[in-house]
Image: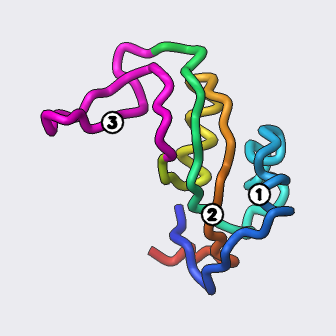
Amino acid sequence: MYYPAGKAHQMNPEQIAFYNIPTNLQRLDEIDPTGPTLFVEVVLSQAKICRRFPLRSKILETGVRDFTNEEIAEPQFMSHIALQDAVQFQGFSYRIISGVMFTERNYKI
């Protein structure tokens, strides 16, 4: 368990393109266990594996939060860990729009 540390850097287009490849995203912690922590703005497609309690939600005009397996057109913000889980356990495909990368991890909790 860790939390992000170090300086936050805006992800450049090359980094965004690299992490838009699902195998690179899924292997992030394998490649470098002490490596970066990502917080990304991402658009997710419809879930291929629909769960009874979906991962995604949106707030309706009535103010009610609606959990759905359907595609939501608006970008969402999440950590690379949440994005890895969305891809692995619900079969989402994704497109990272922008993001912030922390260069270090602090394991002292």
Q: Earlier in the sequence, mark 1 or mark 3?
A: 1
What residue is rendered at 77% in x and 51% in y? Answer: 19
**Residue 37 percent location from the top left of the image:** 63, 65
Per the image, the residue denoted by label 1 is 16
The magenta stretch is 51-75
What residue is rendered at 69% in x and 77% in y? Answer: 103
Mark-to-mark CA distance, 1 and 3: 25 Å
**Residue 108 percent location from the top left of the image:** 51, 77
Horizontal side, residue 36 vs residue 86: left or right: right
**Residue 79 percent location from the top left of the image:** 54, 55
Horizontal side, residue 84 vs residue 57: left or right: right
Labelled pair 1, 3 in contact (Cβ < 8 Å): no
Mark-to-mark CA distance, 3 and 2: 21 Å
Please rate how many residues cluster around mark 3, counting C-alpha atoms within 10 Å: few if below 14, some from 14 to 19, many from 20: some
Please rate how many residues cluster around mark 2, counting C-alpha atoms within 10 Å: few if below 14, some from 14 to 19, many from 20: many
What residue is rendered at 51% in x and 70% in y? Answer: 3
